[in-house]
């Protein structure tokens, strides 16, 4: 069915809104279940501990490194490649408040030199447990503050139903992205938190574009069916959404593949966040606003009143 005289077909996004909402509900429940059962694999930023970066003259054998550390009392050490095959990052849980990071680093180097004399220390980093707890609290407050500010802004700029839809979409994105890290057991540190805040901004930008087009079409399109107007608006913004998402994804794929271990988790969170954010801006935000009964009268009441007054004045 052609709605607009633009020679283009309007896609019926809202016809799948019940399926989409069911799918989103399933993902959210799975995310909550994993977060409460498995929890998150918090990095040193949140748990505290010591990170020791070391380099080798040749590609490192991770199995030998783990065995050497285990033989010297570091069986709980997390070992991974860091940037290249010749550099590794050793992460250790806190050893006690009286044990200095330099001492732990020297012990790690001594243990590794028994397996390879070429090992060289690159850096040592220590985060106290109390600092990690503070970072958790501050990170949660930052996310909550961002969502509240977004709710206020969108309610003032558009309409409170769209504000609820926008914040609902953002909560949807955050919960599912955090759930992905819980399900896969990926490390969750400050870079991941920064990526989630970036996903909030990305998703909100797309949602605002769609909301603005819906409000514009309520004025331009002489149709009273809210579902059709939302479908028209989503179709009109689809090209812009796809171009923005695809170009962003291409950059993130490059970061994921060649950016190194330091930003691997950051790129993973953003890659998934762009996908889920694009989906939520199309289905979640609009579906929530529609379910709450948004209509032309809610967005442009002054125009409706003026038209009614003009009709009453006609002879």
Image (cartoon, rainbow, N blue to C red):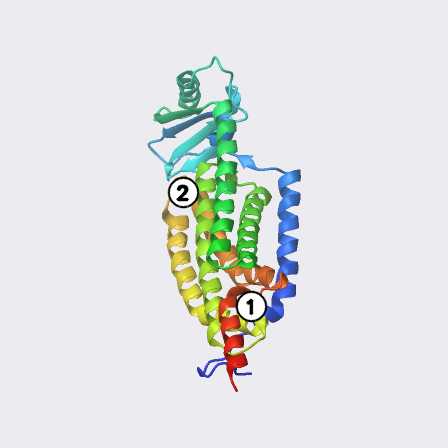
Q: Secondary structure at mark 1?
A: helix
Of 212 and 210, which appears nearest the observer? Answer: 212
* Residue with the mark numbered 2: 263
Front position in the image: 121 or 4: 4
Q: Is the residue 129 above or below the residue 12 in the image?
A: above
Label located before the other in sequence (2 or 1): 2
Q: Residue at x 37, y 52 (%)?
A: 254
Residue 207 locus on image (x, y percent): 48, 59
Query: Looking at the rendered structure, which numbered label has been put on residue 309?
Result: none
Q: Using the image as rendered, state which of residue 236 and residue 121 is in the foreground.
A: 236
Which residue sits furthest bottom?
315
Question: Which residue is painted at 46% across and 45% down in the image?
Answer: 197
- Is the Cβ of the residue at disc 2 closer than 8 Å to that at disc 1? no
Mark 1 crowd level (few <14, some 14–19, many ≥20, 10 Å Cα)? few
- At 45% across and 29% down in the image, what residue appears? 90
C-alpha distance separating marks 2 and 1: 47 Å
Image spot of residue 14 (x, y percent):
59, 69
Q: Is residue 267 visible?
A: yes
In this figure, which residue is indicated by the disc labeled 1? Answer: 297
Find residue 106 and report its horizontal and vertical position in percent: 40, 18
121 to 85, vertically: above or below: above
Local SS, label 2: helix
Residue at the image point whose x is 49% and y is 73% from the top: 306
Toward which corner of the image does residue 103 lie, by quadrant? top left
- Looking at the picture, does residue 36 appear above or below residue 289? above
**Mark 2 vs mark 1: in front:** 1
How many numbered markers are drawn? 2
- Image position of 236 with respect to 161: above or below: below
Q: Position of residue 235 (x, y in %)?
A: 49, 72
């Amino acid at each position: 069915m052609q709605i607009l005289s633009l020679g283009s077909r309007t896609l019926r996004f809202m016809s799948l809104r019940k399926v989409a909402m069911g799918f989103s509900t399933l993902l959210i429940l799975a995310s909550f279940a994993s977060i409460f059962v498995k929890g998150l694999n918090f990095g040193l930023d949140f748990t505290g501990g010591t990170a020791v970066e070391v380099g080798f003259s040749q590609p490192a054998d991770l199995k030998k490194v783990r065995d050497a550390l285990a033989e010297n009392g570091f069986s709980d050490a997390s070992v991974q490649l860091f940037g290249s095959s010749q550099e590794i990052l050793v992460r250790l849980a806190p050893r006690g408040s009286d044990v200095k990071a330099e001492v732990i680093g020297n012990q790690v180097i001594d243990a590794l030199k028994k397996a390879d004399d070429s090992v060289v220390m690159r850096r040592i980093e220590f985060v106290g447990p109390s600092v990690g707890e503070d970072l958790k609290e501050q990170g949660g407050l930052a996310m909550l503050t961002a969502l509240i500010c977004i709710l206020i802004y969108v309610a003032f700029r558009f309409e409170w139903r769209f504000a609820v839809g926008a914040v609902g979409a953002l909560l949807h994105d955050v919960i599912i992205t955090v759930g992905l890290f819980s399900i896969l057991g990926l490390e969750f540190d400050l870079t991941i938190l920064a990526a989630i805040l970036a996903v909030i901004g990305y998703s909100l930008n797309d949602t605002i574009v769609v909301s603005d087009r819906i409000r514009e079409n309520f004025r331009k399109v002489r149709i009273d069916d809210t579902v059709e107007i939302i479908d028209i608006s989503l179709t009109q913004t689809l090209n812009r959404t796809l171009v923005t998402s695809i170009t962003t994804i291409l950059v993130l794929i490059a970061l994921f593949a060649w950016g190194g271990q330091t930003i691997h988790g950051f790129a993973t969170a953003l890659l998934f966040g762009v996908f889920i954010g694009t989906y939520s801006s199309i289905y979640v935000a609009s579906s929530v606003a529609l379910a709450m009964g948004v209509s032309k009268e809610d967005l442009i009441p002054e125009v409706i009143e003026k038209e009614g007054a003009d009709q009453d004045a006609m002879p």
